[in-house]
Amino acid sequence: MSEFHPRIAVDWPLTLEAILAKARLLGPKAVLVFDLDSTVFDNRPRQARIVREFGAARGLEVLKRCQPFHFSSGWDLTAAMTGAGMPAAEASTHYNELKQFWGARFFTSDYCRDDIEILGAPRFLQACVKTGAQVIYVTGRHEEMRAGSVAALEKCGMPTPDGVSVKLMMKPTLRENDDAYKRVAHALLAELGTLVAAFDNEPTHINDYATKFPQAVAVHLATDHSGREVLVDPRAVSVPHFAW
């Protein structure tokens, strides 16, 4: 992942307070949008589990000790292997096989149940619901991950879809492009009410919200991202988490 430096202002909690205040004024007409991975969920436990299982399956003892904190460079599997103690040269020989092993598991309902919450996300999301606003999760996850995603939301104490005030929008299948799907979702969101704020960790996605919905607050979660060299739009506000 290329290094990037999000602009986190010291008064970033005021942004969250202002969003809640506006949502209260608009009530059910207000729409608040949240991505899942690396926005409200920390998926590093899922990632580490997959690396440990790969280590067990291939007899690589060092990888059986992989922990979430070994994913300190976003979704970089090589960095996770070396962080767990595997020499870089050896990690490079296992990368392609691990990537395939990872791909067969990461995008499944069973594994996403391991996700934990981003700091403060449950409290903030519950506060959003209490404003009367609509909370819409818009994710690049596909429909086959719905059951596990809902289970993880419930486990973490975050609002779960009820089809009315809380909805979960997912790609029909894994093969759809995340960027394209989220742009299609923009039209659906516009029909639901007034978009007050959108939260996403991916610079490309939060930039799209800033462009499509200039009246809304585009909130960039400065957690991790896919590694594409995209700068965050200056109109977006970067926050480290939701514990305001």
Image (cartoon, rainbow, N blue to C red):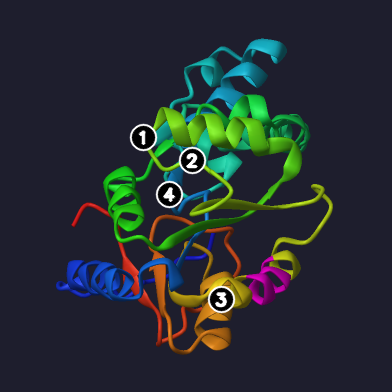
- Identify residue for label 2: 160
Q: Which of marks 2 and 1 is in front?
A: 2
- Identify residue for label 1: 157
Please state which of residues 229 and 196 is positioned toward the viewer in this rendering: 196
Q: Which mark is residue 230?
A: 3
Q: Measured from the top left, where is residue 144 in percent x and y?
A: 75, 37
- Identify residue for label 4: 40
Q: In the image, which residues are magenta?
A: 182-188
Q: Which of marks 4 and 1 is in front?
A: 1
Say what secondary structure mark 4 lies in: loop
Q: Quadrant of residue 41?
A: top left
Could you tell me which residue is drawn at 42 percent across and 28 percent down?
155
Say what secondary structure mark 1 lies in: loop
Q: Quadrant of the C terminus?
A: bottom left
Name the N-terminal-most of marks 2 and 3: 2
Q: In which quarter of the image is residue 4?
A: bottom left
Could you tell me which residue is drawn at 48 percent across and 24 percent down?
66
How many discs mark residues in the rendered view?
4
